[in-house]
Image (cartoon, helix red, strand yellow):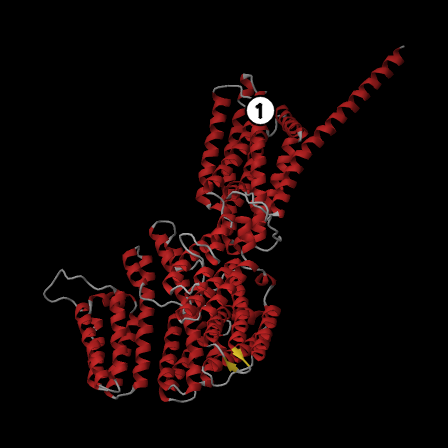
Amino acid sequence: MKSFTLIQKIWLMGGVALLLALLPPLSTAHAAAPTPAQGAETLRTLLFQAQMALNSDGDAAAMAVQAAAAIPQASWFGPLAQQAPAAAARLDAGLSAAQAAVTAHDGNALAVARAQVWTALLDGAQQLVLHAVADGDPTTARSWLLVREFRQATRFSRPQADGTLALMAWERGQLSAADAANAIRADLWDTYQARLNEALRAVATADGRGFALRRAELAASAAGYFAILQPAYLEQRQATATDALQNHFVQLTAAGLSGAAVGDRLAAITTALAGFRAAPLLPAEQAQRAAQLLRFLNLVGVEYGRGVRNGVVTSDLEIREAVTFLSGAQAAFDDLRDFLAARDATQSATLVNLFTQLENQIEQASTHTAVADAEAVAATVAALERGLQATMPPAWLRRDNSADFDVIKTTLDNLEEAVASGDYALAESARIDAYAILESGPEARIQAFAPQFKPLIEDLFWYGQGETPGLAYLLTNQAPLTSVKATRVALDEQLTAAATAVAGNSSPLAIAVNAVIIVFREGLEAVLILASLMAGLKSVEQRRLRKPMWWGVIVAGIASGLTWLLAQGLLTSLARYGETLEAVVSIIAIGVLLLITNWFFHQSYWIDHMASLHTKKKGIVGGAAGQWLGLAMLGFTSVYREGFETVLFLQALVLEGGILTVLTGVLLGLAATLLVGLVLFRLQVRLPYKKMLIVTGIFIGAVLLTMVGNTVHVLQLVGWLPLHPLRWLTLPYWLGMWFGLYATWEGIALQAAAGVFVIGSYYLAEHLQKRNRKQHSRRHIATATVQSTSLT
């Protein structure tokens, strides 16, 4: 025992040295101040040392707590007391309780105090970060954001809500302060709600095993995590429910401290938390977590079946893999539980019980206390899968490739663990599992949308012996863990790149060029319409009639801008629907673009449209009443029609490439249109209108085919279209990035159909016009013959 105490005292001396570094310097005015993260970790370490030393060396424990209690005097602690006084007060109370616990040699009380101090510090750090973002202070925000926790399985953390990335985007000016604060808050609240759920489950486990110290610490941790989430709960459930739940947590902590049963308190807390989510998941995130849940749940039964034979554990590593996959499934289920309860509360309660049953089965096998048959575990998993599939909305049951990539990486983690333990047979089993998931899920999309990654990934999975040998080759030769890790790093890089590629992002330059073509094509048509309408207004008396038309044009430009803002506001409000929204908008844009392209190539469209406008102009010019307003409306409708179409087309590009990329193309297209207008109206230069329309019509046809290809890709991503890759056809990656051309039957067939529709409609229109001319000629000849006969 003396050696253990000596180690503790050495730890304590190190802690006191750190403390001296944290306190305000007395003689070295220029000494470097510690960061909040360093100070927080020192505080946590000192309290842990006190807990370890309490039973064997009370003096050492007292010294550690005393050193910890002095930390609030340090300079780094000052902002916490100023900006988050309630959290600072809880922290001070926890430190006082820790000192009292050491004096009384009460280990449970010290564990509760430690949890209270740490969660209060987390709460204060969160508030400081949000205050700093609001005050425009990125340095403070960056330093205090490091004082935080992460979810146990960081790979399962919610996408698109990472606080650090949001903070960096805000610093670069890419995100507003309000949006950055919301993202940071969502990230932290999501983390601490996951921690709260984990703590509540662990309290029940510790209570069942009789681990009093662990139970006390976890109960206090759960109460501390809820204190962080309390503002969100108060907003959603109001004061009465919040006060009641807070009282339940106080009782839970007291029960943990005294050793009383916690079952009733846990049940009350679980009931009160039902349906509460501090940072709600977006629809796309819900679908991703559902896919992860089903994937991981299936692998629990697979790994358990491999690790158990005839009621005996034959491979502890396989059981540990089952535990890993169960943890992933539980994390996903926790995120979705409230959504499922809202759909079917009874079925959701059944799922909770089944998860508890499965957890007990796996836990008992891992401790060799009672080993359930593999068939029994498989039955529990099957019941869970049936219940989940019956309760989940259809959108969640579509395949999510990002979830597949997550599961592949988790399986490769298990491969590394098996190699570390020297079990190469188990490592090979994990490699085959990971490759099977790749083949049954993302492989078809990689083949179709990012074929350049397929041979690289396969070489790294199998027997590639280039610069980085494949996993199968390494495992066959029982290579050391360092070699396996090196290949794993290379494989992760390729998998990440492939996952990004199959997400379907076009080249920003291609998107900008398409925006230029759309704006210039529609703008050119508006310019030519105006030129045609104003060409007949040549006399001095008539030229004054151009002025109201120009006013109509100006108002149409303003209205087009307002339409753009309205469309952007609508799409922003619906942004949570992600690729689904992009698919819907793209389908609408393609429909209108097909119609416009067809009309353009149909000669009668241009003739009839211009004839209609000229008829309106003659009616207005010929009348006295409302002449000015009528001409203004003519100018307005001539331009706003093109402006409205342009706004509609561009929204699909905005959803695909972002507003800045599209705006760059819009500005270039407007500049080209204004240049043509200047040449036409100011310099009175006669341009080859027909050739310009034909050339821009061909360009807009190319845009149409690109948009069709990209839309098919998005529809396949959201599961609205099947995916059948052309495995015998390997297209360069740039064809997809620039022209939406991917090696899938659906994409190529629909692009070909769009081209055939437009070109076919042109030839059909030509045929109909020739027939009409022949009929008109026959009628003219017949009429002339009748007239000649009558005269004779």
Instruction: Judge by depth and name the residue closer to the eye, 458 or 583.
Output: 458
* Left or right of 163 in this view: 438: right
Q: Would you identify the image quadrant in which residue 50 lies?
A: bottom left
* Mark 1 lies on residue: 691
Q: Residue at x 62, y 47 (%)?
A: 745
Mark 1: amino acid: Lys
Q: Position of residue 594 (x, y in %)?
A: 63, 39
Q: Position of residue 542 (x, y in %)?
A: 56, 20
- Label 1, residues with CA under 10 Å away: few <14, some 14-19, many ≥20: few
Label 1 residue SS: helix
Instruction: Judge by depth and name the residue closer to the eye, 611 or 223.
Output: 223
Is 675 located above or below residue 285 in the figure? above
* Left or right of 792 in this view: 230: left
* Left or right of 410 in this view: 298: right
Residue 382 in view (yes/no): yes
* Left or right of 408 in this view: 612: right
